[in-house]
Image (cartoon, coloured by chain):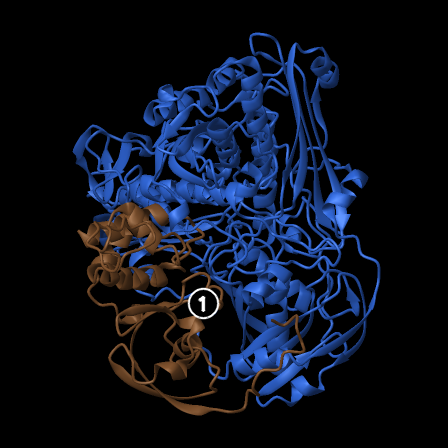
Chain colours: A brown, B blue
């Protein structure tokens, strides 16, 4: 975006009060309205577990849960999420999925891992709620919900918004499938 | 270091070994709970943030730069341009005699000149109290240029390429006999042109630097594959003592070569901190990474193969054109693998180069072999088609007993066995040879193979090992960890060498205060560190034995180290596990808290001696042996006959990588290489506007790296035979995985469709 100097967003000086609920704690911040949820978490709350990979919604490293749904925190303004329950990797406490990632070597450098894990939690909830994916075989008249088995193909399709440049995809899918069973 | 000093420690059947086991990563919990700290994540009081402004022309001079609006933004601390930036001291001229001199990604003195050398060159840095203010103000810097003609179109310049001259690291032209004449006389031949596009590393962690000065002392958290060379380079550029610069990088979020050099962001973050007197964090945007960190060169290649009617190769010709920048870059050794894979009677390998007004190219996973094996291994498949031979059979008929170019011995070569193992695991015998002959429903099915090849190199590493009276072991070595599993495998090696449980070994790395280790690159790190670590463990055991023998009470009195083995936390007589003593008992009796062993020296004569030792061994090894990690890729693709969509449905990789220290982390590395190869073959390319030299797709939404849905289950198999010339018999395997992948896919796509795609990536438009 620095290549287009004619673009002039809102001056940086304006700030407003933003109340967030993050990992069960109420947090009040004074933020410029254009601050993303990702920058609010990382730069203003010091929660560095959520990663910035592209800041453009393309890599999924910033995935967090908002009321249990997975979102890209980089494409989200912090002010939009006033009063919503945000869960970051620091708030993922049951540990089962994380241990499965370690066992299956579902990462190498570890940078995309927080996003993969938060995304997987959101994805498992979507599947449990019967949401189909692009590879789900629909039966006629029953396209809205599915009880399709969470196969490797389903997991791969549903996790494709989370890039891993180290190429640990096999381990990630195996870890998620083990926990889903 | 001689070969005998790195031999395996003595073992007996009963000893519990860690090497060879699929151990979970020691940093797994940190990486899965979000507590692992990367370079942009260190808190500093009064931290300021920096953002870059990029040139919008390919070549020219800055005639005016207006920073008034940017400076007026609330919170802006400084706007640095060539008009006000402090002078940088000159970098060393790149020389293969001093590897650290090659860490400079470009020869540009950033913000020290009004000249613009590429479209995207940083021309200003904004430093502000907040990230938002820095990014916003960067948009307000206005630059006026006097444009100069620029040469940026690789395809148009290809005809002007000049031959690459050889140096200590890579040879120039290599030949055996008259390959052109043999090709002309060959009863069966192919003569083919291949092209590959520019690629970018796209590690998910953006390049990031946090820099803090205290007088002339500088602390840098940098996303780097080379903490020592970053330290030396920054000391040189800012004119401060090396000892006062500390570079810290315990976690690096992927590198793949992109973080192997020092690029603008690192230098300018340190400069911004110097000028403002504040700690400064510079996290590059994804777009800024494309504009300031080099990628892989594009290439145009010719592979011509001649064979007799039985398929024995009589001629092998591989020539290439690639590019560097006018202000830096090294020629990518595109033909590097082609002199080693086939027993051709005549060989000609030759590389050519053009210089463009673009950001210089840089190393990217398996520079040379990755794109070179695409052309060679696809051409071999085409020759097999001409001969009516199975492509594996053709390879077996040409598998050399000695290095084809010069007749040197291989240290150990099991490519034949790798093919046999892979073919069995993959079910190659089920393949019907005719293209288009296999179907699964409406999908066309294709199966392809190709060879993988990458040489292992060892560099010089320094290390210390401490064994304490509480039984713990601390290994200190300034190597890098960006996902290879270095701390885990070095811990395993130390545990076995000293005969202690893995849990009692702690490995410290990623900090320039530690003994100096080489950069992580070229599949060198594991072997380089292991060599030093084994020597240090050996020294440590000698010291422990000497300590024990001083006491009349020790059962080790009168014993010699070659009759002892390290096990159960101590030294015991081989074959008599009852005779011996625990380290903790030896230390306790001697009243010593710990014993240290050091290998190599970071300073003075010791460092020079280390370099001389390294170069001597490197040159001697190269005279005696040709060694390489090799492998055979087997893949299956499905192609939609109507849309040309290609899905990779199966993959088996069968590898000869010497001893496998940790099959879990090793397989992840090899899979990672294969996944990157799938991207290289099927979807990745950096698009450069041939008029302006501007990268047109500088984002992860338009540069398509493989996603979950693109990657099938990848089976990895090992021959696990030690390489007798390498420490513990291991060969580095970070790069071999990507080699041959694109060819295996192109060959499979041909088998499915009858189409030969010789220009990567194999996008569906090329199949319609």
Residue B762 is drawn in which quadrant?
A: top right
Chain at tag 1: A
Classify residue B628 as left or right of residue B592. right
Classify residue B726 as left or right of residue A91. right
Q: Quadrant of the C terminus of chain B?
A: top right
Residue A77: % across, % down: 43, 79
At mark 1, the secondary structure is loop
Question: Relative to A134, does residue B110 appear above or below in the rendering?
Answer: below
Classify residue A25 as left or right of residue B668. left
Residue B307 is drawn in which quadrant?
A: top right
Which sits in the foreground, B721 or A9? A9
State the count of labels: 1
Residue B149: % across, % down: 84, 58
Question: Relative to B36, does residue B67 appear above or below in the rendering?
Answer: below
Which sits in the foreground, B24 or B313? B313
The residue tagged 1 is: A52
């Amino acid at each position: 975006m620095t290549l287009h100097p004619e673009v002039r967003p809102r001056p940086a000086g304006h700030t407003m009060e933003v109340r967030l609920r993050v990992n069960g704690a109420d947090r009040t911040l004074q933020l410029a309205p254009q601050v993303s949820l990702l920058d609010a978490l990382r730069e203003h709350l010091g929660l560095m577990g959520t990663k910035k990979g592209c800041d453009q919604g393309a890599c999924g490293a910033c995935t967090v849960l908002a009321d249990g749904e997975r979102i890209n925190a980089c494409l989200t303004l912090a002010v939009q999420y006033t009063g919503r329950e945000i869960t970051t990797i620091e708030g993922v406490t049951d540990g089962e999925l994380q241990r499965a990632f370690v066992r299956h070597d579902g990462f190498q450098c570890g940078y995309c891992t927080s996003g993969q894990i938060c995304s997987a939690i959101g994805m498992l909830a979507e599947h449990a709620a019967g949401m189909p994916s692009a590879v789900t075989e629909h039966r006629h008249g029953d396209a809205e919900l599915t009880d399709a088995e969470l196969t490797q193909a389903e997991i791969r399709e549903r996790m494709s918004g989370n890039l891993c440049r180290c190429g640990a995809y096999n381990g990630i899918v195996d870890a998620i499938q083990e926990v889903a069973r | 270091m001689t070969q005998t000093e790195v031999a395996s420690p003595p073992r007996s059947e009963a000893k519990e070994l860690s090497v060879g086991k699929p151990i979970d990563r020691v940093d797994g919990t940190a990486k899965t709970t979000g507590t692992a700290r990367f370079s942009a994540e260190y808190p500093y009081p009064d931290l300021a943030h920096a953002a870059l402004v990029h040139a919008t022309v390919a070549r020219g001079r800055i005639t005016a730069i207006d920073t008034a609006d940017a400076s007026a933004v609330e919170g802006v601390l400084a706007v640095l341009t060539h008009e006000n930036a402090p002078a940088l001291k000159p970098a060393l001229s790149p020389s293969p005699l001093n590897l650290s001199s090659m860490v400079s990604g470009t020869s540009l003195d950033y913000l020290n000149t009004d000249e613009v050398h590429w479209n995207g060159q940083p021309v200003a840095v904004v430093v502000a109290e907040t990230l938002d203010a820095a990014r916003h103000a960067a948009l307000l810097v206005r630059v006026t240029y006097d444009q100069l003609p620029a040469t940026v179109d690789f395809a148009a310049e290809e005809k002007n390429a000049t031959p690459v001259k050889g140096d200590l690291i890579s040879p120039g032209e290599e030949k055996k006999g008259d390959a052109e004449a043999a090709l002309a006389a060959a009863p069966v031949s192919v003569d083919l042109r291949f092209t590959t596009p520019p690629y970018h590393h796209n590690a998910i962690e953006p390049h990031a630097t946090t820099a803090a000065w205290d007088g002339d002392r500088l602390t840098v958290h940098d996303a780097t594959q080379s903490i020592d060379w970053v330290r030396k380079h920054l000391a040189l550029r800012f004119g401060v003592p090396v000892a006062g610069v500390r570079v810290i990088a315990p976690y690096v979020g992927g590198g793949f070569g992109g973080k192997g050099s020092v690029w603008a962001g690192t230098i300018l973050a340190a400069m911004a901190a110097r000028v403002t007197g504040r700690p400064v964090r510079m996290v590059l945007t994804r777009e800024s990474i494309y504009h300031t960190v080099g990628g892989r060169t594009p290439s145009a290649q010719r592979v011509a193969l001649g064979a007799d009617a039985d398929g024995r190769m009589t001629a092998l010709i591989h020539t290439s054109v690639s590019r560097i920048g006018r202000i830096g870059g090294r020629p990518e050794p595109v033909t590097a693998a082609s002199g080693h894979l086939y027993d051709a009677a005549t060989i000609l390998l030759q590389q050519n180069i053009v210089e463009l007004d673009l950001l210089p190219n840089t190393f990217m996973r398996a520079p040379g072999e990755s794109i070179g094996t695409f052309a060679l291994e696809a051409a071999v498949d085409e020759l097999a088609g001409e001969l009516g031979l199975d492509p594996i059979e053709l390879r077996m008929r040409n598998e050399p007993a000695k290095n084809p170019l010069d007749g040197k011995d291989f240290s150990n070569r099991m490519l034949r066995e790798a093919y046999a193992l892979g073919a069995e695991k993959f079910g190659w015998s089920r393949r019907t040879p005719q293209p288009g002959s296999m179907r699964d429903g409406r999908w066309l099915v294709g199966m392809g193979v190709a060879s993988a090849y990458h040489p292992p190199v060892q560099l010089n590493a320094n290390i210390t090992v401490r064994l304490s009276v509480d039984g713990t072991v601390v290994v200190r070595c300034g190597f890098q960890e960006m996902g290879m599993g270095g701390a885990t495998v070095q811990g395993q090696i130390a545990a076995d060498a000293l005969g202690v449980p893995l849990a009692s070994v702690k490995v410290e790395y990623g900090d320039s205060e530690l003994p100096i280790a080489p950069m992580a690159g070229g599949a060198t790190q594991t072997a380089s560190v292991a060599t030093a670590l084994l020597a240090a463990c050996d020294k440590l055991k000698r010291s422990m034995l000497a300590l024990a023998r001083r006491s009349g009470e020790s059962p080790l009195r009168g014993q010699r180290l070659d009759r002892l083995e390290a096990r159960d936390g101590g030294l015991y007589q081989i074959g008599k596990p009852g005779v011996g003593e625990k380290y903790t008992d030896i230390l306790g009796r001697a009243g010593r808290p710990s014993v240290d062993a050091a290998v190599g020296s970071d300073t003075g004569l010791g460092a020079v001696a280390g370099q001389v030792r390294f170069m001597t061994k490197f040159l001697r090894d190269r005279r005696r042996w040709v060694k390489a990690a090799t492998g055979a890729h087997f893949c299956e693709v499905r192609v939609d006959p109507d849309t040309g969509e290609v899905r990779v449905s199966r993959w088996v990789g069968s590898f000869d990588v010497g001893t496998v220290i940790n099959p879990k982390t090793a397989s992840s590395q090899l899979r990672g290489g294969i996944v990157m190869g799938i991207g290289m073959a099927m979807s990745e390319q950096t698009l450069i506007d041939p008029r302006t030299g501007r990268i047109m797709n500088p984002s992860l939404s338009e540069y398509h790296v493989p996603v979950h849905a693109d990657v099938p289950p990848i089976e990895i198999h090992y021959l696990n035979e030690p390489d007798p010339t390498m420490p513990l018999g291991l060969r580095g395997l970070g790069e071999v995985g990507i080699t041959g992948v694109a060819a295996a896919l192109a060959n499979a796509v041909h088998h499915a469709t009858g189409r030969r795609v010789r220009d990567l990536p194999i996008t569906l438009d090329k199949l319609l």
